[in-house]
Image: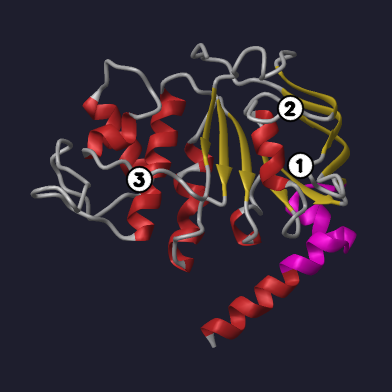
Amino acid sequence: MEPTDVAPAVRFRGVGFTYPGGDRPILDGLDLEIAPGETVAIVGENGAGKTTLVKLLAGLYSPGTGSVTVDGIDPRERRPPITVLFQDFVRYPSSVRDNVTAAVPPPHDDAAVREALDQAGASGLPDDLDASLWREGAGGTDLSGGQWQRVALARALYAVGNGRRLLVLDEPTANLDVRAEAQFHDRVVARTTNTTTVLISHRLATVRAADRIVLLRDGRVAEDGTHDELLERGGDYARFFTTQAAAFKEDRA
């Protein structure tokens, strides 16, 4: 995986995928194109294939039918310049610095490490980048779930700053509170330039400012457009968003 200064293009063409032993395809003739530098949110009900799409993009799985390419190249043949933040991210029993730089080979720049932590909104961490985040170790510091998620996000952002121009965020606000979630786009997505970004979330308030929102249903793209376009269309996205917005108002009442 070679670092690059250019955001890549992504293409899924007629992609089908069924897990071994599965009785139905998770993806079934999926067609999707993402332009260089575009931010595309992928939404849909549980089991719609959102995370499967990400693993195909990263070259972790092979499509049963069709093709996946990044700048015209199969990610299984040459790994793309990608960094992925999964919901079940790794918590390394090591220093703050090591947790942020784990996806990038040395040498490392401490100023860039601190910038990534700041962009991720990581607060309450030790000032010393050598401080251990291993609670089992002598003098180690443990973090809350939200703090760990911001450290993991800083790791992804540091990788972007070092040439991983395909950024995938899979449920990036799962451990953040409502206020932090509202700040997520301004802090992260809007400040990540010259990067092709795929954002997956079931909390639609996080994805509304994406360039495009793609809703998956029955293994295919069922809806594709901006937040306003999809609300006006009155389909599943509009129904999901309205339901979540009503629930949020009830919670705040």
Q: Which residues are magenta?
A: 222-241
Q: Residue at x 38, y 39 (%)?
A: 154
As measured in the structure, the alpha-carbon distance from the residue carrying label 2 to the one carrying label 3 is 27 Å
Q: How many numbered marks have been drawn onto this rendered protein structure?
A: 3
Judge left or right: residue 106 versus residue 157.
left
Q: Residue at x 31, y 37 (%)?
A: 99
Among numbered discs 2 and 1, the one appearing first in the sequence: 1
Residue type (three-letter) at the residue carrying disc 2: Ser
Q: Residue furthest bottom?
A: 253
Q: Which residue, given by chain and number where applicable, does mark 2 sit on?
A: 62
Magenta span: predominant SS is helix
Q: Which residue, given by chain and number where applicable, does mark 1 sit on?
A: 19
Q: Which residue, given by chain and number where applicable, does mark 3 sit on?
A: 91
Say what secondary structure mark 2 lies in: loop
Q: Residue at x 14, y 48 (%)?
A: 137
Query: Which of the two residues, 197 or 101, is positioned nearer the viewer here?
Result: 101
Residue type (three-letter) at the residue carrying disc 1: Tyr
Q: Residues within 10 Å of mark 3 (few under 14, many from 20)?
A: some
Residue 213 image position (x, y, % from top left):
74, 47
Q: Considering only vertical position in the picture, is 144 above or below 213?
A: below
Say what secondary structure mark 1 lies in: loop
For the rendered model, the colour scheme is: secondary structure
Residue type (three-letter) at the residue carrying disc 3: Arg
The quarter of the picture where the C terminus appears is: bottom right
Q: Residues within 10 Å of mark 2 (few under 14, many from 20)?
A: some
Residue 210 image position (x, y, % from top left):
65, 45
Residue 203 image position (x, y, % from top left):
62, 61
As measured in the structure, the alpha-carbon distance from the residue carrying label 2 to the one carrying label 1 is 10 Å
